[in-house]
Amino acid sequence: MEKQTENNASVYRMAFAATVAMLVIIPLQIAAFALWPMPADTAAWFSLMRANPLAGFFHADFFLMVNNVLILLIYLAFYHSLKRLDKGLLQAALLLGVVGIAAYISSNRTFELLKLSGEYAAATDPDSRIMLLAAGKAMLLGWQGTAFDAYYVLNGITLLVVSFLMLGSPEYGRATAVWGLVAGFFMTVPSTAGTLGLVFSLVSLVPWYVFALRFAGVFRRLSA
C-alpha cells in the first residue's frame, strides 16, 4: 500500500506542475490574441509567420497543443483520484478525451505553416506562389476542421463526466465540481461554430481557469 501511495504521489506532483504551466500559458495566449490580430487569409498567415514567428505560433495554437499534452498528465491524476467512484465511467470519459487530444495534435499545422511561409517568401514565380497559397489554405482548413471539432466536443464530455464524479469526492468538493461542470457546458459547442462557438469558447476560459486553480490545490495536497 505504501508503494502504491508513493507512485500516486509522483503522478500528482507531475499533474500539479502541468497545471501550473497551463495556468501560465493561458493568459499568455489571451495577451497574444489581444496584441496581434488573427490573420485574415493565407497570405497574412505567411506574413505573420515570417515577421513574428512567436505570434504566429500563438495564433496557430502551438501552445494550445502544449496545453493538451499537459492535460494528459492532469487526466492521469483525475483517474487515480476518482477511480474509486466509478472506474468504468471514468475510463470511458478519459478515453474520449485522449482520443480527442490525439486527433487535435495530429491536425495541428504550426510547423508546416512556418515552412510554407519561408518557401512563399523565397518564391519568385507567380505560379509557385499560388500553389503555396493553396497548400497553406488546405492546411488551415484541415487544422480547424473535423479533428478540431471532435477534440473540442470529446473533451467537453470528458470534463462533464469528471466534474460530475467530483460531486461525490471529498478531496475536490462540490464547488470545484460545479466550476468544472460550467466549463464543460460551455465546451459543448466548438469555437469554430460561428459567433456562438466563439462566445462560448471565450466564456469557458473563466470557469476553466478557476476549476484548474482548485484542482491544482487538490493535486498539491495529494502529492504530499
Image: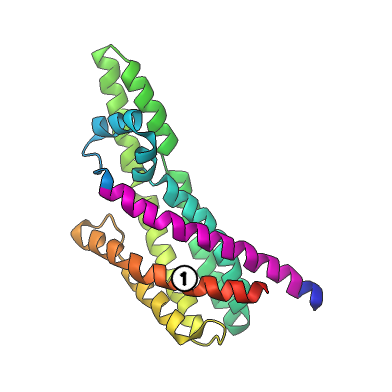
In the picture provided, is 37 more to the left or to the right than 214?
left
Question: What residue is at 52 percent from the left and 81 percent from the top?
Answer: 172
Question: What residue is at 55 percent from the left and 85 percent from the top?
Answer: 169
Which of the 4 image quarters holds residue 53? top left
The outermost residue toward the top is 125
Check disc 1 and report its element: helix, strand or loop.
Answer: helix
Q: Position of residue 166 (x, y in %)?
A: 50, 81
**Foreground pick, 32 / 103:** 32
Way the structure is coloured: rainbow
Amino acid type shown at disc 1: Leu
In the picture provided, is 9 more to the left or to the right than 86?
right
Quadrant of the image containing the C terminus:
bottom right
Question: What residue is at 69 percent from the left and 70 percent from the top?
Answer: 9
Q: Is residue 187 visible?
A: no
Marker count (numbered):
1
Q: Position of residue 42 (x, y in %)?
A: 26, 33
**Foreground pick, 218 / 184:** 218
Magenta stretch, main secondary structure class: helix
Is 23 magenta? The answer is yes
Rate crowding at label 1 as few (under 14), some (14 to 19) or many (20 or more) other CA atoms within 10 Å: some
Residue identified by numbered label 1:
213
**Foreground pick, 200 / 20:** 20
Is 203 magenta? The answer is no
In the picture provided, is 191 more to the left or to the right than 68?
left
Which residues are the magenta region? Answer: 5-34
Question: What residue is at 80 percent from the left and 79 percent from the top?
Answer: 1
In the picture provided, is 171 more to the left or to the right than 128?
right
Relative height, residue 118 to residue 152 (above, below): above
Q: Position of residue 218 (x, y in %)?
A: 56, 76
